[in-house]
Image (tube, helix red, strand yellow):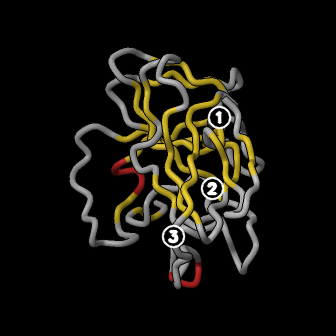
Amino acid sequence: MSAELVGDDAGPTIREGLNLRVDLSKRSSSSLIGYKAKRFAGVVDVDAVGVHRISQFWDLIYFDPDGRLILDPTDFYILASKESVSVPPAYVAEMAPFDPLIGEYRVHYAGFFDPGFGYAEGKAPGAKAVLEVRSLDIPFILEDGQIVGRLVYDKLTETPDTLYGGGIGSHYQAQGLKLSKHFKQD
């Protein structure tokens, strides 16, 4: 499925959603492509911001020249989309499965995008979608650039007074591959 922009009196809409691909490529300054949650790592205090060491909870996943990652069904991964996405101020978006017939994996555990995500100072430079990924039942091979989900947009009845973004201290604005605000670099 591909996204189709359609204009009408209510403004543009995207039918069927915007396809998102997984980024397993080597980034310019780092070969880090993702994180794999450690088993039995302890409890994250969700009230504590920037205090948990990444190495206590996550294993780092580095670029593989084959451009592949084998998902172990017992593990949970954080990866990023190739695309930078934006959500216009009058819209929200939700991550949806691309096609459940392709394989049993999920990338949309925390897949809600607020109005203004990917916007800065009235412009839409975009931000990477962080993918929370788990394979179900069997190992699954992901390849760099593989379509893994869809971003489905819905128009709001009113544009909110306050948008997602740096002005309200949003942690994920202009993000790339990133963990939650609870973690700090070691």
Distance between the Cα atoms at labels 1 and 3?
37 Å
Residue 56: x percent and y percent? 34, 51
Apparent side of residue 4 relative to residue 109 in the rendered image (left or right): right
Query: Which residue, as the protein is rendered here, is positioned at the far front?
Result: 9
Lower sequence index among marks 1 and 3: 1
**Which of the 4 image quadrants contains residue 150?**
top right
Q: Is residue 88 above or below residue 140?
A: below
Lower sequence index among marks 2 and 1: 1
Res. 148 mark: none
Q: Amino acid at mark 1?
A: Leu
Distance between the Cα atoms at labels 2 and 3?
30 Å
Secondary structure beneath label 2? loop
Lower sequence index among marks 2 and 3: 3
Residue, disc 2: 176
Residue, disc 3: 157
Distance between the Cα atoms at labels 2 and 1?
13 Å
Q: Residue at point 40% right, 25% down?
A: 135
Residue, disc 1: 24
Q: Residue at point 67% right, 53% down?
A: 13
Q: Residue at point 52% right, 66% down?
A: 156
Residue 22: x percent and y percent? 62, 36
The foreground one among 127 and 116 is: 116
Q: Are marks 2 and 1 in contact (CB under 8 Å)?
A: no
